[in-house]
Image (spheres, helix red, strand yellow):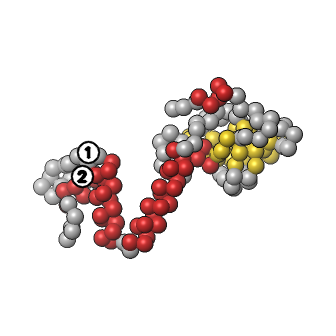
Amino acid sequence: MFPYDRDAFYAFFNMPTPNGGSQAHCLDELGALTLALQAALVQCPAEQVQALLQREMASMLRSLSKVRRAPGQAVQLEEEAGFGATPGRWHILPGEPSSCPLCGNPACQEWPTLARVAEDGSVTDELAYHVSECEMSDDTRKGASNDSSSEKATD
Ligand SMILES: [Zn+2]
């Protein structure tokens, strides 16, 4: 049995209702979240739901605080990222970005190739791949190559 609003449950998952109708799009985001939370709490331990919420909130809030990037920019990575990227300064090489598979923020992009920046500021031939903007921070070190025009790149 459904201890929560069954019609809203069907609508949230865009399923036809038992009487053949569809109530898709009748919920706004907070309504859908409320319903999903109710369903999760009925079926999962509260600690598991709370951990999920904390993880997803931290990931999305972090992503929403990030700026969009462009080829030619230098960025700072605080942690390992993508394939082969370790903490340090990296340079975004030309390439077509794709949707970020990590955070769920539709504005966040994953850049295909980065090159490590050496201590002297030169771009090396050490490459890393598939690093998302939500994993990047501004390069604030002395001699950072970012200019103000590259900061305005948004969706
Ligand atoms: Zn992301």
Image vertical order of residue 4 relative to residue 99, above or below: below
Q: Relative to the observer, which residue lies in front, 134 or 100?
A: 134
Name the residue at 80% across, 42% down: 117
Give residue 32's position: percent from left, percent from top. Answer: 30, 53
Tell me the element at label 1.
loop
Task: State the image quarter where residue 120 is shown.
Answer: top right
Tell me the residue that label 1 is attached to: 25
The answer to whether mark 1 and mark 2 are in CB contact below 8 A is yes
Residue 39 in the figure: left or right of residue 45: left
Give residue 102's position: percent from left, percent from top. Answer: 54, 52
Direction left: furthest residue: 19
Amino acid carrying mark 2 in the image: Ala
Q: Relative to the observer, which residue lies in front, 138 or 131?
A: 138
Tell me the residue that label 2 is attached to: 11
Give the label on residue 85, or none.
none
Direction right: furthest residue: 120
**Number of other residues with Cα within 10 Å of mark 1, as a class: few under 14, some 14 to 19, many 20 or more:** few
Give residue 16's position: percent from left, percent from top. Answer: 21, 53
Give residue 34's position: percent from left, percent from top. Answer: 30, 57
Q: Relative to the observer, which residue lies in front, 16 or 23?
A: 23
**Number of other residues with Cα within 10 Å of mark 2, as a class: few under 14, some 14 to 19, many 20 or more:** some
Image vertical order of residue 60 relative to residue 5, above or below: above
